[in-house]
Amino acid sequence: MMTFEELGLKPEILKALQELGFENPMPVQEKVIPLLLSKNTDIVALAQTGTGKTAAFGLPIVEQTDTKSKKTQALVLAPTRELCLQIADDLNDFSKYVDSLSVVPVYGGASIEVQIKALRNGAQIIVATPGRLIDLINRGVAKLENVSKVVLDEADEMLNMGFEDDLKTILAQIPENRNTLLFSATMPPAIASIAKNYMSNPLEVTIGQRNTGAENVKHVCYTVHAKDKYQALKRIADYYPNIYGIVFCRTRKETQEVADKLMHDGYNADALHGDLSQSQRDFVMNRFRLRQLNLLVATDVAARGIDVDSLTHVINYNLPDDVEVYTHRSGRTGRAGKTGISIAIINLREKHIIKQIERIINKKFELQDIPSGRGICEKQLFHLIDKLERVEVDEDEIAPFLTTTFKRLEWLDKEEIIKRFISLEFNRFLEYYKNMPDLEIPTEHSRREGQRDSFREGKREGRREAGAPRTAEKGYSRLFLNLGKEDGLYPPDLIELLNQYSQGRRIKVGRIELMKKFSFFEVPEQDAQFVVDSMKGASVSGRRIAVDWASGGENEGKQQSRGRDDFKRSGERSGFKKFGERGNRGEHGDRKRFDKDRGEKNERNNSGNRSDRSEKKEKGSFRGEEKKKYGRKKENRR
Ligand code: AMP
């Protein structure tokens, strides 16, 4: 193994590295540092996050900066403000003992005036997000004509976020004899094209196998019914008492909802997504860094800047649309020599995606059953006993209280004391899981049965659509929803929708009938009014959702204002005109409508703009309202 001395770094840097506890270079550093110090080579490095890549490019940059000149000599571009700050911090750490070296981070969402001042004072190294840098170039403050080293960090992420044109604009401003280094976790064609068009004969350095998930990450998959997803998440969180992880969701809305439910259920959790203002994001992130939160529920975009190396878990509450993104997610755990677990909670329909991911990460998922209530209780109990065994007893501090304590407890024998102590800490788990059945494991058989049922239902549906409504199963009420197959609605979507608005209450869903333009579903009688009420004001893709009592059968009496005829005549159900934003429906007539709602494309684009350009707009977000509702009281777990 090489040493940093052997790599040829100057004593001031070696001293700083020693203080940082960097004993030996990591593989990416061993490969990249000598190349950068000895030759003017362009490099494309395929390296996951957490592999030590910041030092790989940062140390040679610090080493080669001419501190006698105040001109900007190196530029590091990164996708997010958080990563920008993290890189600038690292560079400052590496250059702690190098005199007169100035690193200036510039990024969106912060005062441009302050950054202008900092740049005017001289910045030999600029670390920037692309959008803000272009602003500063246009204002004539960021001057790149003397830049000889450019780093594109997390280049794939920058492209994902829509920064491709910005990157090209920036690269066009920098002299061609520069040295360009590109770091990326994946190698999509757009990266290859940047390498081809903006770099000269780059050397390709691969750390680990291409696209491989981090070595020390175990990949685990739980298959559940869509309606059980949230319960599954809770069980996983309970099964790992020391969990410190990120729960990835697809949309900002889902992110907020899952976080709200977790907070409501007493977990130390919070949400991080693009609907939050920068200061809200900073607040949440800081709490997470300080481990005041065990679970951070986040979108991919928002999670990009999280610089925490000690995550025990990454949980894919929903798999990403782009399977490559899984690599980024799972790479957030198992960092800096630690082990981690990346969990995917999926339903049967998503099994093929797991296969695709396995091919990309070149590893198999362990298929596990969702922990049983008993299993969770045992795990929590052992955790408690473990804590008891490890607790440090401060003999001096505790001594004055012992006499009274012993006296108070002398009527209890050891066994009784242990039982009571355990109950004190543990009753809440026992209570919660006492009568809780195991989550049903979906099987191919149940799926086929489900499909057969839907087929039979479908055949009947044809008849009913033109005629009388059916009656609900015994004990169930039949409800109407103003979304149907043409809106891309499938049964799991409907269940997910209900879960989203059920405020943590578990709603059993009976038969579901999907028509072209609307649907019927059944819920237990006692829950029906609650569902109708809780769905008021709900929306998907900005379209209002309406749930109401269906006409006919036993629900007829509960109908508020409509008669059976409302359903009889036309597909448009004139009686339901009050839900009437149905006029544009045609243009969304496929599954994409739902997928789009889940997708983050909008967020990506917005986020790029937002982080660099328009933070102000974000005040008064939905989250603010929600915070008022739930407050932050229930920070402690159940
Ligand atoms: P990075 O991939 O640059 O985000 O680095 C991941 C983590 O590894 C950071 O916490 C670094 O401080 C740490 N690190 C980087 N290089 C070394 C090294 N040579 N020895 C020990 N830790 C390191």
Image: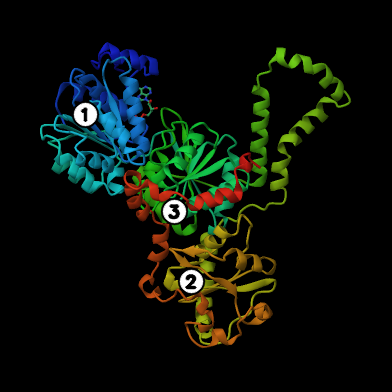
Task: State which tag comes first along the sequence, 3 or 1.
Answer: 1
Camera-side residue of 113 and 449: 113
Q: Residue furthest right?
A: 411
**Callout 2 amino acid:** Leu
The residue drawn where x is 38% and y is 65% is 592
Q: Residues within 10 Å of mark 2 (few under 14, many from 20)?
A: many
Query: Nearer the observer, disc 2 or disc 1?
Result: 1
Disc 2: which residue: 483
Residue under pointer 3: 251
The label shown at residue 424 is none
Bin the neighbour count of mark 3 within 10 Å (Cα to Cα): few under 14, some 14-19, many 20 and up. many
Drawn side of residue 471 relative to residue 24, left or right = right
What amino acid is labelled 3 in the image?
Thr
Whole-angstrom CA distance, mark 3 to mark 1, is 36 Å
* In the rendered image, the vertical position of residue 511 relative to residue 609, given as above or below: below
As drawn, is 584 to the left or to the right of 508? left
In whole angstroms, how far apart are the C-alphas of marks 2 and 3? 20 Å
Q: Is mark 3 within 8 Å of ligand 1?
A: no
**Residue 232 visible to an observer of this rendering:** no
Which quadrant of the rendered structure holds the N terminus?
A: top left
Nearer to us of marks 3 and 1 is 1
Residue in the image at 55% along x and 42% along y: 269
